[in-house]
Amino acid sequence: MTLSATPSFPSPAQRRLPVPAWPRYALAAAVALALALAAWTVLRHEHTLRHGQPILLELAPVDPRSIMQGDYMTLDYAEEQVLRSQYQQRSSRDEGTLPVSPATYAYLRVDAQRRARVAALGDTPAAPGGLIALRLRGRAHAPALGPHAFFFQEGAAQVYETAHWGELRVAPDGTALLVTLRDAELRPLGQNRF
């Protein structure tokens, strides 16, 4: 019997404990679920942009110091100012705040040129005849009809300085997406694929 001068140790690969397969499958399933959710959201928004009802909301003046900030423009809507004053009046009268829940909708009356005005508020996306339901977002003191930022290509700020209207597309569930800005004569500003 011969003895070896160097002891034999297991290699690092031999020393590893066996890892069960389920953590890898769980991680793969979580990643697949996250990607599927992201894809579903993108498809839903693309459907709204292509098939949603177009409306035009008049833009309200914004503090000129904050209107253009790099490659985006701060937006405010004239109809939101009306809603804010109504909410403030109701809030002071009721001595409390009025919640803007996920199920609060502004019902919009749209004219022949697709310009929208708030006609009423409600709790369902099923708008009364001839009106379009737009889901309100935000807090009780600041209900939001649409996005408050419009992003554009670097160096294109001058194109959007004459913006007077925001064009949104509204889905049947009341979700609204900002598509483009328009001037006072309702002409689209900048490049747009919709």
Image: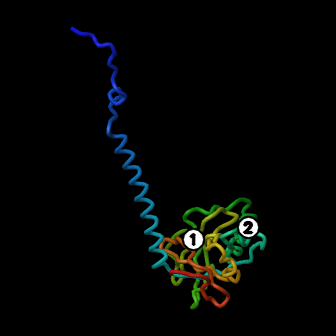
Give the class, few, some or many, for how many residues have Cα within 10 Å of label 1's Cα (few <14, many ≥20).
many
The foreground one among 33 and 99 is 33
Left or right relative to 52: residue 110: right
- Residue 109 versus residue 84 in the image, above or below: below
In the visual, does 94 lie left or right of 15? Answer: right
Q: Which structural element holds mark 1?
A: strand
Residue 42 location (% of width, % of height) = 46, 67
Q: Is mark 2 on a helix, strand or loop?
A: helix
Q: How is the image coloured?
A: rainbow
Q: What residue type is labelled 2?
A: Gln
Rendering quarter of residue 5: top left
Whether pointer 2 and pointer 1 mark residues with C-beta atoms closer than 8 Å, the reply is no
Q: Name the residue under label 2.
A: 88
Q: Nearer the viewer, residue 119 or 149?
A: 149
Q: What residue type is labelled 1?
A: Tyr
Q: Earlier in the sequence, mark 2 or mark 1?
A: 2
Q: Quadrant of residue 133?
A: bottom right
Q: Counting other residues with Cα less than 10 Å from the Cα at mark 2, is it few (<14), some (14-19), or many (20 or more)?
A: some
Q: Which residue sits at x=59%, y=89%?
A: 111
Q: Residue at x 71, y 70 (%)?
A: 84
The residue that appears at 46% across and 72% down in the rendered structure is 46
- Counting the numbered discs, the total is 2
**Residue tagged 1:** 105
- Residue 137 drawn at (x, y percent): 60, 65
- Among all residues in the image, which is located at the extreme top? 1
Image: 102 above or below 109? above
Which of the two residues, 37 or 10, is positioned nearer the viewer here?
10
| Image-based side of 135 in relation to 161, left or right | left
Q: Where is residue 143 in the image (x, y as percent from the top left)?
A: 65, 67
